[in-house]
Image (cartoon, coloured by chain):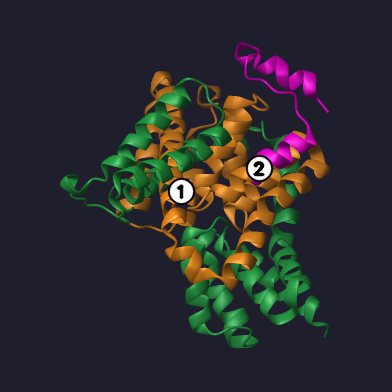
Amino acid sequence: MDILLQLFISFAMVGVFCVGGGYASMPLIQVEVIEKYGWMSMNEFVDIFTISQMTPGPIGINAATFVGSKVAGIPGSIAATAGFVFPSVVIVLLLAYLYYKYGNVGPIRGILNGLRPAVVALIARAGLDIMLLAFWNKEKLPVDVMQTDKIAVLIFILTYIMLKKKTGTIKLLFSSGIAGLVFYLATGTHP
Amino acid sequence: MDETKVTEEKLEKAVFNKPFSYSRLFISTFIISAFTVGGGFVLIPLMKAKYVDEYGWMKENESLDLVSIAQSAPGAVAVNASIIMGYRLGGILGTFTALLATVLPPLITLTVVSYCYDAFATNPYVRMFLKGMQCGVTAILLDVVLGLLVKQMKKKLALPLLIMAGTFIASYFLKIDIMHIILVDAVIGFFLMRDSQYN
């Protein structure tokens, strides 16, 4: 079989069965990519995982890009990535269609009303995670208040003030990045 | 496009409303995706801050519904969220605009970074910039969470607050699988939250 097609199908499988997002895709990638085809080693997979911690993008996309480019260059990475998102496109579009058609039918409305506060909780969870990482460089509680990164807190407060002055999201992201560069350089500390 | 309808809904935010365009959708999604480290539920509030609060392209409740759907479908939640929000904003073409804008940054970054990972990861300037951005993202997330929380509090309904607290504790402290929690929340909603006061 054509290698590009094989990449597409393999990552489509990972995409279909990766329910719950993020880390849920890891065992699938392990079975489909490492054990079945030997497209990469376990060590490389761990490396991708590390890279995913500090670069943007879902781990599934990152793995697809890495494996695809290793097996068949840039066309390979495109084929694998397209495979990974293909099931999502089909299923999510179907759900979107159903939502706009039946979203106001009693039981469906009920389910969505139940999930809405859950989404708030999941965002709050991600917020707490990233706050621990930003202020204390730790991944979970508890933290030592004495060890707080004061520069990080300062940038946080400045961003929050700018946010309240209705600065756009993207401008905020860039200015906080530049603030990090300037403040850490000026104080001679390392994050 | 139903551009007029979208702007009518959010007239009170007229100062920040920007008319919908595919290029604006692409550019804003691309930049958010390119600079957001930390997974789907970090990216989603940024999309919400951009599309809902800043541009006024859709209503808050609708955006939360769409995220619920994105979370329930297989695949990466950030990808799913961009597919469904793109669809809402610009139909099928909107889907592919947002999807491409979400997928391209990690595709490009990973291709580049995989060649020079060590230089990238240990570069002090990169770390300083990333650290600063982490603080900025924290501020945006806090703002989104507080806004949603205050809105729920004002409704004075016990059930949504219980779901919120329960979901947070179950996933953060008890480390229960998110799909199981979502399922329980859906069942609670199915039986107890059909009333329009919960809409």
Q: Which quarter of the figure is the N terminus of chain B placed in? A: top right
Would you say residue B25 sits in the magenta stretch?
yes
Chain ID for orange: B
Question: What is the span of residues highlighted in magenta in the rendered image?
Answer: B1-30
User: For the residue labelled by badge 2, is the local secondary structure a helix, a strand or a loop?
Assistant: helix
Left or right: B182 in relation to A151: right
Q: In the image, is residue B34 above or below residue A120?
A: below
Q: In the image, is residue B85 above or below residue A129?
A: above
User: For the residue labelled by badge 1, is the local secondary structure a helix, a strand or a loop?
Assistant: helix
Question: Mark 1 sits on what residue?
Answer: B129
Q: Residues within 10 Å of mark 2 (few under 14, many from 20)?
A: many
Chain ID for green: A
Q: Which quarter of the figure is the C terminus of chain B placed in? A: top right
Question: Mark 2 sits on what residue?
Answer: B29
Magenta: main secondary structure equals helix
Q: Residues within 10 Å of mark 1 (few under 14, many from 20)?
A: many
> x, y percentage for residue A141?
25, 52
| Gap in angstroms between the C-alphas marked 1 and 2 | 20 Å
